[in-house]
Image (cartoon, rainbow, N blue to C red):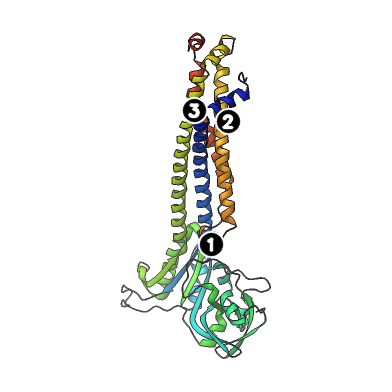
């Protein structure tokens, strides 16, 4: 039940115009800090996650190296060699293995008419494209099982090398000469973000079937292989299984960690996730403290208003107003103040994120966005701030002695 007309309460705020504006700005700034920092943190995390996924979805890249321990009569320093069959057999020999592709690598010259271009050439299996997030631009495809089985002379182009060689022409079906042999383009890489690579970024790679690569260049030994676990959470167990399986096949100690050079991209993803979780927590704490400071300003303002209205409150109580009515009214007025300041801060944060989302800053900041969780959390935080800020002034007003109030 409201016993003070709204216009009278607003008049009280106008009489304290400077204090009221400072209070609203304090709450608004706290809300802005919470919402904006979490929104920009989410945008940056999504950007870095997308860049990380450019290397592949939870993939592991492994190179076969030299041994550093003697084993079963073999001396240390022995160069290990692996074939397609050795690597493909890991699908059956390693529990939890989801996919695997041997990879051959070399720098090779290509010719389009009289123009020549030198870039990274990969001989791979069809599953490689999916593992390495090599999404195909419209109208084309990646290498398939028939290409591999028949040793077809087909190629998949990185988007940047395609632009260099063919410009804005439609590349699908075009003939490109590789090592003196004509190849047909079957697909082009869809542009993607990529923050890490090996032997060059994917937009400058050319992929051909591994069977075609071996026939053309005579290579027998793979340069490296790419794989991923069926369950990314089991990647470390699968890595151990790879060491054990290849150790048996290639005769090296599975505990010789340098025999295989392993790059587990899931480790970077875990570290990145942990860092951003910590940033979000710190941002939320910093914004919450700022908002609580604004809440103190609201509480002080309500104390001032109550003191100036003590005679009015005393008259209301003498005329039968119950203490809980006074308590509820002061709490409601406090919540209105906090909500007004919070709405200003929320709108400012939303406006800033909208401006950044249509600016070139997205290349370095990502697309900041206010999630439902942030919105709900902000509402709950503002409600808590309002209750804390209004409780003590409301209790003081509700406990006033009407006679003493009338004498003030």
Viewer-side residue, 243 vs 200: 200
Left or right: residue 70 versus residue 109 is: left
| Location of residue 379 in the rendering, given as x and y in whole percent from the top left corner | 56, 37
Q: Earlier in the sequence, mark 3 or mark 2?
A: 3
Viewer-side residue, 103 vs 156: 156
Q: Quadrant of residue 248?
A: bottom left
Q: Secondary structure at mark 3?
A: helix
| Location of residue 94 in the rendering, given as x and y in whole percent from the top left corner | 48, 66
Nearer to us of marks 1 and 3 is: 3
Nearer to us of marks 3 and 2 is: 3
Q: Which mark is residue 336?
A: 2
Viewer-side residue, 203 vs 13: 13
| Location of residue 389 in the rendering, given as x and y in whole percent from the top left corner | 49, 29
Q: Which mark is residue 363?
A: 1
Which residue in the structure is indicated by mark 3?
301
Q: Earlier in the sequence, mark 1 or mark 3?
A: 3
Q: Quadrant of residue 182?
A: bottom right
| Location of residue 361 in the rendering, given as x and y in whole percent from the top left corner | 53, 59
Check the picture and name the quadrant holding the N terminus.
top right
Left or right: residue 211 versus residue 267 is: right
For marks 1 and 3, give the CA distance: 44 Å
């Amino acid at each position: 039940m409201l016993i003070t007309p709204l216009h009278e309460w607003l008049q009280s705020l106008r009489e304290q115009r400077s204090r009221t504006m400072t209070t609203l700005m304090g709450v608004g700034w706290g809300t802005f800090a919470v919402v904006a920092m979490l929104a920009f943190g989410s945008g940056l995390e999504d950007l870095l996650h997308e860049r990380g996924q450019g290397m592949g979805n939870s993939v592991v890249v492994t190179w076969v190296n030299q041994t550093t321990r003697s084993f079963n009569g073999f001396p240390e320093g022995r160069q290990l060699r692996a074939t397609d069959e050795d690597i493909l057999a890991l699908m059956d020999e390693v529990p939890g293995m989801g996919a695997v592709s041997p990879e051959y690598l070399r720098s090779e010259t290509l010719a389009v008419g009289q123009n020549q271009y030198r870039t990274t050439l990969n001989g791979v299996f069809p599953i490689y494209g999916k593992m390495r997030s090599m999404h195909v631009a419209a109208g084309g495809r990646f290498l398939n099982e028939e290409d591999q089985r028949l040793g077809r002379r087909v190629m998949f182009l990185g988007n940047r090398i395609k632009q260099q060689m063919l410009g804005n022409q439609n590349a699908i079906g075009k003939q490109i000469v590789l090592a003196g042999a004509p190849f047909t383009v079957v697909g082009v890489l869809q542009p993607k973000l990529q923050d890490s690579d090996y032997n060059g970024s994917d937009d400058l790679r050319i992929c051909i079937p591994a069977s075609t690569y071996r026939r053309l260049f005579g290579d027998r030994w793979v340069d490296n292989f790419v794989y991923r676990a069926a369950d990314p959470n089991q990647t470390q167990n699968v890595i151990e299984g790879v060491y054990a399986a290849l150790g048996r096949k290639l005769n090296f100690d599975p505990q010789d960690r340098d025999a295989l050079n392993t790059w587990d991209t899931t480790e970077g993803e875990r570290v990145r996730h942990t860092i951003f979780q910590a940033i979000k927590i710190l941002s939320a704490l910093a914004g919450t403290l700022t908002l609580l400071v604004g809440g103190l300003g609201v509480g002080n303002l309500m104390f001032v208003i109550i003191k100036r209205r003590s005679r009015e409150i005393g008259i209301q109580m003498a005329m039968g107003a119950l203490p809980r009515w006074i308590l509820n009214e002061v709490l409601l007025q406090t919540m209105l103040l906090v909500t007004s300041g919070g709405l200003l801060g929320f709108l400012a944060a939303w406006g800033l994120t909208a401006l950044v989302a249509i600016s070139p800053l997205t290349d370095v900041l990502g697309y900041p966005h206010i999630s439902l969780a942030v919105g709900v959390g902000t509402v709950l935080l503002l409600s808590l701030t309002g209750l804390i800020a209004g409780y003590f002034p409301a209790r003081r007003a509700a406990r006033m002695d009407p006679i003493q109030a009338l004498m003030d």
